[in-house]
Amino acid sequence: MKQAYIFFTAVFFMLLAACGDEKSKEPAQKAETPTPSFTASVTVTATPTATVAPTSTPTVAPTEAPADIPEVAEDEENFEKALNDFLIAELGQYFAPLEHCIPFTILVDLDDVDKENVKIYGIFWVQDYKLNGTVLENVSGGCFPGVVKGKKTDGVWEFTEIERVASGSGNAESAKKIFGDRYEAYSMVISNDNVRTMLRTEAVKKYVKANDLNVTAYKDYGCDPIELE
């Protein structure tokens, strides 16, 4: 059974929230990557209300948190660190190295049933910043859709390969080949600016906290700073 990681569960709920906001706006247009329209179908089944005699007293059994929560949290942290280290090493080489390199992932799907053949389908971002006062200013970076491959051996995560979506005229065909039946979900998030901004902001916040930096915002060239609350 596929293990659920908090790192990616957070992404999923933020994606749902963002998609809800997008319904009131015209979807952003991306060259070569059309964004399909989705209509969510939710079925709600009414639950009949049981009649309880006045003399009966319901008994509620106490619930206990799973004992392996600390281990799961640690595994998630190691997973995310291994992925980010791979993205910096593999994709950061295409940009001038700066003091602050912050990757983040927009998840499409995680296939970790076979721990010897783990696949992460998503849009992988790597961005370099320079610190100007208390603001991280983005200088370079890029987006790399595709699938990252790796494994988990003796509790250690290792990612070693990325199959990237082709750029240019073959973009759509390449994406369909790599994502397969995940292509529809990929098309939805690749154009969603709200999702990208939320995940990017969270990644910057975590980086700032982990490195104990006095940073209040980050910004792109020619844009207003985005405050870190």
Image: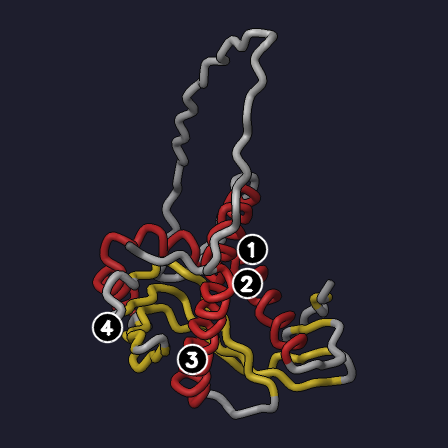
- Report the amino acid beneath label 2: Leu
First of labels 4, 2 by sequence position: 4
The residue nearer to you, when weighing 44 against 40, is 44
First of labels 3, 2 by sequence position: 3
Q: Which mark is residue 116?
A: 4
Kindly check if marks 1 and 2 are in contact, taking CB atoms under 8 A apart as contact.
Answer: no
Q: Position of residue 222 (x, y in %)?
A: 67, 74
From this view, report whether residue 108 is shown above or below residue 223. above
The residue nearer to you, when weighing 56 against 103, is 56
Q: Position of residue 98 (x, y in %)?
A: 58, 91
Task: Label 2, secondary structure: give it.
Answer: helix
**CA distance separating discs 1 and 3:** 22 Å
Residue 221 appears in the rendering? no
**CA distance separating discs 1 and 4:** 34 Å
Q: Which mark is residue 87?
A: 3
Task: Label 4, secondary structure: give it.
Answer: loop
- Report the amino acid beneath label 4: Glu
Q: Which mark is residue 199?
A: 2
